[in-house]
Amino acid sequence: MLKNITLSAEEELIKKARQKAQKQRTTLNASFREWLKQFVNTGTGGSEYESLMKSLHYAQPGKKFMREEFNER
């Protein structure tokens, strides 16, 4: 379900944003919804990475590898 919100911005900024959206063959409303999705999801990758690293704390190589060992097939 979509909910309406009210935002305020400079008139000229809104005009330019509408023109840009029109050039991209979309609407300002659709562009804002896409931005909002990205805004909400920004930063979650870092916490996911940290969780993964914590869950893998037990994995230790146990020794240092030599260049020749890396290149073995």
Image: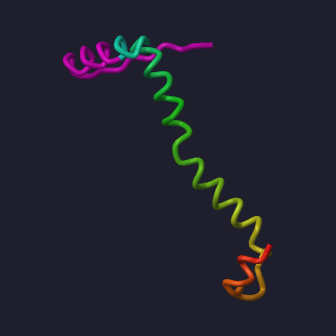
4 to the left or right of 20: right
Rendered residue at 59%/47% (across/down): 44
Rendered residue at 29%/13% (across/down): 19
Dividing the picture into quadrants, the one containing residue 32 is top left
Rendered residue at 30%/21% (across/down): 8
Rendered residue at 74%/82% (across/down): 69
* Residue 13 image point, x, y percent: 23, 21
Dividing the picture into quadrants, the one containing residue 55 is bottom right
Depicted 16 relative to depicted 43: above or below: above
What is the basis of the colouring in this image?
A: rainbow
Depicted 47 relative to depicted 68: above or below: above
The residue sitting at the left extreme is 12
* Residue 12 image point, x, y percent: 19, 18
Q: In which quarter of the image is the C terminus?
A: bottom right
Depicted 36 relative to depicted 61: above or below: above
- Say whether residue 28 is magenta: no
* Residue 23 image point, x, y percent: 34, 14
Q: Count every numbered label the image shows and give the total.
A: 0
- Name the residue nearer the viewer: 19 or 54: 19
- Say whether residue 14 is magenta: yes
41 to the left or right of 12: right
* Residue 60 image point, x, y percent: 76, 79
- The magenta span reads 1-20
Q: In which quarter of the image is the N terminus?
A: top right
- Name the residue nearer the viewer: 53 or 66: 66
